[in-house]
Amino acid sequence: MLPAILIFFALLFESVRGFIITVDAHEDICFHEHVLVSERITISFEVMEGGFKDIGVSIKGPENELLHHSTRESVGSFTFSASKMGVYTLCFDNQLSTLTPKVLMFQFHVIRGLAYYTDPQRRGDDVLEQAVVQLMLNELSAKMTAVKQEQEYMHVRYRGHLDVSDSVHFRIVSWSIFGPSLLLIMTILEVYYLKRFFEVRRVV
């Protein structure tokens, strides 16, 4: 029973790539996936933190042809079918940033065709012979990944709001201490000045 469960989860997350990464200033990070002809590729990303929340994105095909390129994007989603078999590359670059790293969440999802699971030579294993069942597992995998990424996104948003709340609270407390202290110092100085002003000096 346990091997069957392990095989189920191995197949469930076989073709999903979902990450939260940090891209430092002047850094490029690339991810690669081998794709067969007519398989569908889904790429989505969103910049969570850092600067103006933008980053450079490029998608390249097996022959290094440029499928998509932009220098500044905050959020994006791309879905297309592979026209050639080979390695497809997704790159994020933070070249325009001088100091600020960018934190982003992205998904690199390849939906395999039925031929991948029905042809043992392509598949490279004999774990699952029922292509319809595998297709259902792929759909379930995509939905579970979406839920997981949504939870991670909400966690990052909560952490950002918590940092802002802590910063505002610290400023309020600091000002509540600084304001009365400044008022007290000014009062003491005014009393001292008036006392010196009305002081009568006697010459012996």
Image: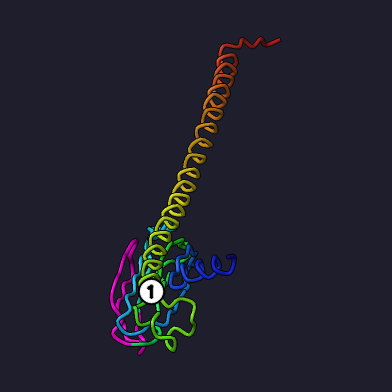
**Quadrant for the C terminus in the image:** top right
Question: In front here: 11 or 156?
Answer: 11
Q: Residue at x 51, y 35 (%)?
A: 169
Res 199 → quadrant: top right
Q: Residue at x 34, y 78 (%)?
A: 113
**Quadrant for the N terminus in the image:** bottom right
Q: Residue at x 53, y 23 (%)?
A: 183
Question: In front here: 194 or 44?
Answer: 44
Whether residue 170 sits left or right of residue 74 in the image: it is right
Where's residue 155, x and y in %? 47, 50
> In terms of secondary structure, where does tag 1 sit?
strand
Judge whether 172 appears above or below 4 on screen.
above
Q: Is residue 44 magenta?
A: no
- Residue tagged by mark 1? 110
Q: Which residues are magenta?
A: 60-84
Whether residue 61 sits left or right of residue 27 in the image: it is left
Q: Is residue 64 magenta?
A: yes
Where's residue 30, x and y in %? 45, 76
Question: In front here: 124 or 24?
Answer: 124
Question: In front here: 119 or 111?
Answer: 119
Judge whether 80 appears above or below 166 on screen.
below
Where's residue 142, x and y in %? 39, 64
- The majority secondary structure of the magenta stretch comes to strand
